[in-house]
Image (cartoon, helix red, strand yellow):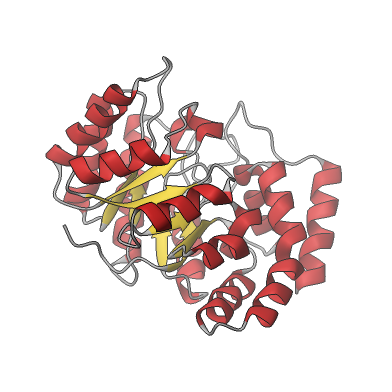
Amino acid sequence: MPSPDIHGIIGYTITPFTADGEGLELAALGRAIDRLIDGGVHAIAPLGSTGEGAYLSDAEWEQVSEFSIKRVAKRVPTIVSVSDLTTAKAVRRARFAEAQGADAVMVLPTSYWKLSEAEILAHYRAIGDSIGVPIMLYNNPATSGTDMSVDLILRIVGAVENVTMVKESTGDIQRMHQLQHRGEGQVPFYNGSNPLALEAFAAGAKGWCTAAPNLIPQLNLDLYEAVRANDLSKARELFYRQLPLLDFILKGGLPATIKAGLRTTGLEVGDPRLPVFPLDETGRVNLEKLLKALR
């Protein structure tokens, strides 16, 4: 199955909440999406870790999915994260996203129980059989508790026709080199670890899935363009200039840091939903210093 042209900087969206945390603020979500697209990102990815998809009710998840797809309006590809603890709900979410016009879906195999390789493959096969759009396989053991080996990833890609892309977030650059080598350059993969952005592009990553362009889109885009131009000296300078903020975003937690950062730009998107805390005062001060240094 051919994939849409998903490349470059893939911007992850937040999910804005009301002041009491009980409702959605879709108008703020629309402004955040427009900022990302106007800032030049090459694709939009709602409802992942940054979008707090795991903390939404089913009705809220559908609202955010439908709204995001319609707001993007095919200006760039939309990749909707449909991950869930159960295969049945992941299938329902994948079908819903496809029906609303998503260009692709992203699947992280999350489970309370440790899954066998056969169970993981069956999970992807069930989702793949239920939809006609491409699937981005997402490997992030830090959040899912499941670490898929390169062997397993390539088995899934070979067995499920519409698993056509891989997002690799283990933080192990050798995984990307192995995907490039053993996949013979035919399996597009994307970096999901901010501190590895430069090394990932050097390893052959087709894109960078990141929440950072909510705050520093131009620096992210400039890095990508420098890599494409094979200007490694410029790419290194750009990467190390933004690395302190990239590290801070990762260590401070994506929803908390991105929402606090957006607040400094005048876009109020509420706090993360409990049990996640917003940034404390020290964190906010440090974030503002990092952002000021880059503006």
Res 145 visible: yes
Query: Where's residue 39, x and y in %?
Result: 52, 74
The quadrant in which residue 113 appears is top left
Tell me the quarter of the picture where residue 206 sits: bottom left
In terms of depth relative to the viewer, which is nearer, 229 or 254?
A: 229
Residue at horizontal 28%, vertical 22%?
Answer: 119
Residue extending farthest top: 113
- Image point (36%, 24%), residue name: 85
In this rendering, position of residue 65 left or right of residue 273: left
Tell me the residue at 42%/17% (across/down). Answer: 114
From this view, report whether residue 232 is shown above or below residue 96: below
Instruction: Say left or right for 160 vs 79.
Output: left
Quadrant of res 187: bottom left
Q: Does residue 270 appear left or right of residue 81 in this picture?
A: right
Check the image and report above or below for 56 versus 8. Answer: above
Reply above or below: 148 against 11: above
- Name the spot of residue 89 as percent of width and height, x first: 26, 28
Q: Depth check: give the residue in front, 205 or 133.
A: 205
Locate the N terminus and report the quarter of the image it occupies. Answer: bottom left
Nearer to us in this view, 270 or 38:
38
* Residue plotted at (46% across, 62% down): 205
Q: Is residue 147 above or below residue 209?
A: above
Q: Position of residue 255 (x, y in %)?
A: 60, 44
- Quarter containing the C terminus: bottom right
Q: Is residue 45 visible?
A: no
